Image (cartoon, coloured by chain):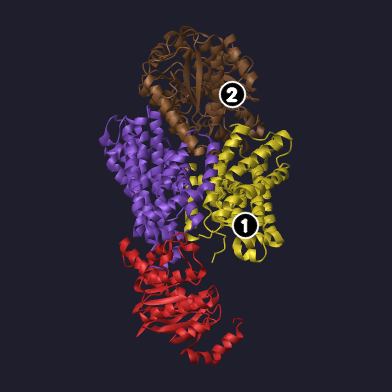
Amino acid sequence: MKRSRMWRAATAAASAAVLAGALGSAAWAADTVKVGYLIPLSGTAAAAIGQEMSRATHLAVDHINEEGGIKALGGAKLQLVEVDTRGDPQVAITEAERLINVEKVSVLIGAFQSSVTFPASAIAEKYQVPWIVDLSAKAEITERGFKYVFRPTQIPSSGNADSAADFIAWAGKTTGKQPKTGAIVYENTDWGQDLANTMRKRMAEMGIKVVFDESYPPNSPNLRPLVVKLKGAHPDVISMTSYTGDAVQLQKLIAQLRVDAMAIVGSAAGHVDRTFVPTVGVKAADMVFTTNGWAGYDSAITTPFARRFWDQYVGKYQADPTEFGVTAYADVWILKDALERAGSADPKAIRDALAKTDMKDNDITRLVGYDIAFDSKNQNTLKRFVVQQIKDGKYYTVWPSKLTPAGYKMVWPVPDWSDR
Amino acid sequence: MTSILQALFDGLASGAIYGIIALGLSLQFGVMKIINFAHGSFLMVAMYLTFWATSLLGLHLLAAIPLVVAVLYLVGWGTQRWLIEPVYRKEATREPISVLIFTTGLWIFLDNLFLVLAGPDYRTPAGDWANGVFVLGDLIFTYPQVAGLVVSVLVTLLLVLFMRYTRLGRAIRATGQDREAASVLGIDSAAVYRTSFAIGLAILGVAGALLLAIFPVDPFIGDLFGVRAFIIVVLGGIGSIGGALAGGLMVGLIESLGAQFLPITYSEALIFAIFLAVLYFRPQGLFGVERA
Amino acid sequence: MSLLEFRDVTRQFGGLRAIDQVSFEVRENETVGLIGPNGAGKTTLFSMASGFLAPSAGEIWFSGARIDGRPAPEICRRGLVRTFQIVRPFGEMSVLDNVMIGSFLHHRDRAEARADALAVLRRFGMAERAGQPARTLTLAGRKRLEVAKVIATRPRLLMLDEVMAGLTRVEMDEIIALIRSLRDDGVTILLVEHNMHAVMALSDRVVVIHHGRKICDAEPEVAANDPAVVEAYLGGDEE
Amino acid sequence: MAARALLLPLGAAGALLLPLAFGNPYALSVVILALLYAYLALSWNLIGGITGQLSLGHAAYFGIGAYTSTVLFADLGLTPWLGMLAGAVLAGIAAVVIGLPCFRLRGAYYALATLAAAVILKVVVENSNELLGGPRGLDVRLLHDAPLYFQHTSKLFYYYVVLLLVGGALAANRWCLRSRFGYYLTAIRNDQEAAAALGVDARRYKLLAAVLSAAMTAIGGTFYAQYALFISPEKVFGVHLSVQIAVICIIGGRGTLWGPLLGALLLLMVVMRFEPRGVIALLGRALSGSRRLSGKAAKVRREAA
């Protein structure tokens, strides 16, 4: 019984697909613009992040539609077709094909993880449908020189590590307390290795001796041995590159085992996840530094546009949005800007409009904290990271210093655990 | 030197918890000879129950243990009675492959059920108890480590005594050794299976609380510890209660000490390699009794 | 001429001597009964001769070659095969397929093996059950299949382990007739049997084992009156 | 009888023409993956089904196949068609290395040992950065339309290749079931000692079956690498893959000719939609109906005999 129904469903889907194919590509109906959205919602350590991004993306679509949709298309509404990648590249590849060929989306957004975005965006290039990369940092995503893949809100991973290194140099100079030894701890993945490579090079340039340099398999059951070893190396400054689960575990262990260093500097991701402080504990997370792709409430929520997003997000989900949500929200608005200029839902027209994106000092740039325009490889090189310090459970921007909220004074070096 | 001593203690402490995770599996595996792939998922369930007991009822992590143990005992009894038993009975004479497939399904199902129920976030109980430490010179012991060590040894001891000196315990052992012979002696093997499965899960209740103190829970946490539990069971000797604890301690020590000399990315391979070596040279496990 | 010979064979399990310096031989075309109370060590001797157990000490020779400690398949290929006391049919396979496993020893080709196996089944009066799964046979059927499987390997020496236990009188007579016809074909037989009537009827000679030791090796009538044998059976708690 | 004789050519013709029914590459890619899984399940069937050795480590061979051809292509420019054979040979050797110690173990022990072997291989690959790309994995250099180098932009190319593989695997299984080799393997599954008593060298035949199964699985690995053009340790050596291969074969009916094919088609139709509840439902039905499925397959087996 059930099996025959399944067969029927399959054949129905197949024949529907044949029909859709026969109708051809002429019919980019203008009453809705279909947007494919690929994001990890389960099955991976990044699912928590994916969830925040998904919420913000939905919020942006609602806001745009409430305001009357895409005016250049006669008020066409955005229609989001969301897909859970489960952090699996193969799933994303297959789903990208489905979104393009079956759902007939005009544009794709996604997919947070570099390992997923990299192969899946090649599908978009193949079928000539634009893909807006959200936060995937792998350099090659834009280095390939694809015509249809745009990265407005992220720079390659090295940019993240460069910001952390710049900050360490600056902090050492301004406080007069220069670190002499360093440790590099990173997850054993694409992203972790990219950052570690840059950090290794930068530390050498700064004259910081790397006394500990080790990776760990992501989602490790027990990182305690690693931290014991790290403690034995006595580094002055520790660079960390982790997703949430490992970041939480590492920081708890550092607090428990009282690993004393002048500074611990995280690389956004796990360290800026909204669950990081509550899960680690306010005391154990205190005074940790981290890069962040976004400067935080005090520095960025300054316009009515930004406030509407903030208030509604907080009202709906009882949690403050972070870089993930903010960026996801902005990406949809960057798409909207392109659609208005394209005046068409045709993927090629959208691509051409996206390529000409040039935002300065508008609501969107003020929200994200940097201007948006693409170089010849469709990379926005204007994005930068800030560095924040966690104090009493809150994130304060400390670098660049002009963004530091009045009344906050950076703690560097941080006191030993026994003195807290 | 300090690092090595610290690593030694850490290895014992995490090993004790691994051991108690494997304990229930060893019991089920030893008595029924089934591969329960959902074991890790039941651990995840235990951790969530503990988390909710602490966050919703305001219980201390350790105080939540009896409650979680009771709930999991019932879950285990019910799972065996209404889910596994019908599948198992069909293949009683052969290698119970269907149970393996069934528990694989249960594993996927439970993981996704809790993704829906609890969301994908990492969760850890509030309160500073889990971060509290004893400092002894340069060595640092956290409260959860010490508690884990003590409770694990205690539970193992209790189970050994139970199996040795109670009527029910002896019935379980007899059934594990020879089901037919046990049934001749008037032991109802189906009832024994239900009890064994239930006890296996109840012990996971203890393990869940101890683990939650050192490791946050998310819906997929079971994948991490499930396979490891199997390895420990085989290392220690299938069905051997003390062996499960010893196997756990061994894995803890390999992991902790091994990482002081090798990159930690190798520790998993090291554990598996030692596992294979034991399997080859002592297939009955390090502490198992040779089967005729 | 001696076909199978045990020379001072000993087997220990832990501290226990299951077999203690047993020596005897089976000559070509002879039928020898191996008897003794339960737990005397008869099946252990079978297991050692067929390669499933290695002796702790001593030697076993078959047809001029030393075979103790050799793997079971090799011993089978030399022409020495055994049946199992608790029958072991390939339950999921058909009766014919079961016998074909034996006949494949001499035929690579499936059709030939099949024809050969069918011939064996006909001789065993089981041809009409050829297509039936082996596990559905009655106990008598399974005992018979156990013999048919090994006969298909065309053995020189056949070791039968209690092929009559649990059978009715009629079934037993059928098996006895079958064994006789095998013997008439020139197959040498070593037979473990509890049923004295059957042993006496079939054997040219009996070897009596008690507590792992050989206590008698003589013609059936002589053995039956041997005081040591009588003592072993009366003193034991069996039969 | 006549109808049965017609069935095979009709099925083959249907399979050849199937892509015409699909208007878009997405549907075809689902079918290709389903067929790949069917091929893997058929390969697994030789050792896991017919011989009854429950291997949960077949990802090891899959990974060896994928990595061997990819590395040979990247570093020596060898066409993956030849790399595929090299991978098959390597996987066969690996099967001997893994099999010799593991075959002493029964049932669950064997399953866990094979699983452990696969995990070790995965970790080793993850830790070897230079040659094998470490945890990043390896990209297969894009050549677009290069059938001589096992690459094509059209999915049809991969469809027909994987169809050929499935056909080959079916033929291998059929030959196996109908030859002395297969009879021996079946006997070993039923009772290894009883088989040994009849002159069957169980270890030798188990090893042969394992080698054949491993080599075939490795070929599937190369196909996957060429199809996805990207491989990583987690994807090709992961525990999930091993378990999936085994479960697909078992659901369809292990030890049978058509079971693995059926299992792959059933499971993939549900799994592709990523509905865990659907998977559970399917598993439940497969369990209750397992007797029926394998019963039917057993009949096919008997008729073939």
- Amino acid bearing label 1: Gly
Chain C rendered in what hue? red
Q: Which mark is residue A389?
A: 2
Q: What is the x, y in percent for residue D80?
A: 29, 39
Q: Residue at x 35, y 21 (%)?
A: A145
User: Viewer-proximal residue, A345 or B130?
Assistant: A345
In screen coordinates, is D235 left or right of A393?
A: left
Q: Residue at x 48, y 79 (%)?
A: C173
Chain D rendered in what hue? purple
Residue D226 image-quadrant placement = top left
Q: Please name the residue that numbered disc 1 is placed on.
A: B242
Chain A rendered in what hue? brown
Question: Closer to the observer: label 2 or label 1?
Answer: 1
In screen coordinates, is C87 left or right of B74?
A: left
Chain B rendered in what hue? yellow
Same-chain status of marks 2 and 1: no
Residue C124 image-quadrant placement = bottom left
Q: Chain of mark 2?
A: A
Q: Chain of mark 1?
A: B
User: Viewer-proximal residue, D269 or B108?
Assistant: D269
Q: Secondary structure at mark 2?
A: strand
